[in-house]
Amino acid sequence: MDISIRRIEPGEFTALGELTARAYLDGGLLDFGEQDPYLEVLRDVAGRAAHSEVYVAVDGDGRLLGGVAFVPAGGPYADIARPGEAEFRALAVAEEARGRGVGEALVRTCVARARTVPGCVRLVLSTQHAMRPAQRMYERLGFVRTPKRDWTPIPAVPLLTYALEL
């Protein structure tokens, strides 16, 4: 599969928001389904882009395959990054593109980008228990579990954390 990773264009905000919402809904990752308040956060790509670097994966025809938000040095969109750390969030891949290396290409982009951030020594992320395929990919790429940093942003949604030393 021909995959390119690049910064998102404003005209793609809505499409990536829907792709991200669908990935979480179809994956059973939202406790309240279509009524889950987190859906608005997932759909708010403009908000992500205002406080992070949003990257998209596209195929040779320019079709949107997935996206991720890279947070270089904390700020309002960081959940767990500490000083000297970068973070990525809202990694999502379209259902028809799963298993083709899209998620890995997006994560590798975040790793490469983190290595260019002055003073950045670690890349961190949070993930849900049910996201086993993503966790296997993170581990394959060298991320390690950081259980002391696990957290629960809302009741009944415990998140696991991982870190990659750069």
Image (spheres, grey):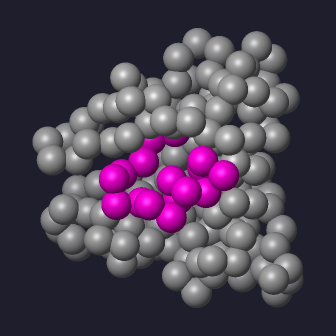
The answer to if 129 sits in the magenta stretch is yes
Total numbered labels = 0
Q: Is residue 159 above or below residue 131?
A: above
Q: Which residues are magenta?
A: 125-140
In this rendering, position of residue 38 left or right of residue 66: left
In this rendering, position of residue 57 left or right of residue 136: right
Q: Is residue 139 above or below residue 114?
A: below
Q: Residue 122, can we see it?
A: yes
* Residue at image location 71% in from the left, 19% down from the top: 121
* Residue at image location 81% in from the left, 83% down from the top: 1
> Residue 116's spot in the image, x, y percent?
84, 29
> Residue 153's spot in the image, x, y percent?
26, 37
* Residue at image location 44% in from the left, 41% down from the top: 126
> Residue 103's spot in the image, x, y percent?
64, 63
Find residue 66 and report its image quarter: bottom right
> Residue 117's spot in the image, x, y percent?
78, 25
In this orientation, which residue lies closer to the viewer: 118 or 146? 146
The answer to if 83 sits in the magenta stretch is no
In this orientation, which residue lies closer to the viewer: 33 or 29? 29
Q: Residue 87, can we see it?
A: no
In this rendering, position of residue 90 left or right of residue 84: left
In this orientation, which residue lies closer to the viewer: 105 or 22? 105
Find residue 73 and report its image quarter: top right
* Residue at image location 37% in from the left, 23% down from the top: 148
Quadrant occupied by the C terminus: top right
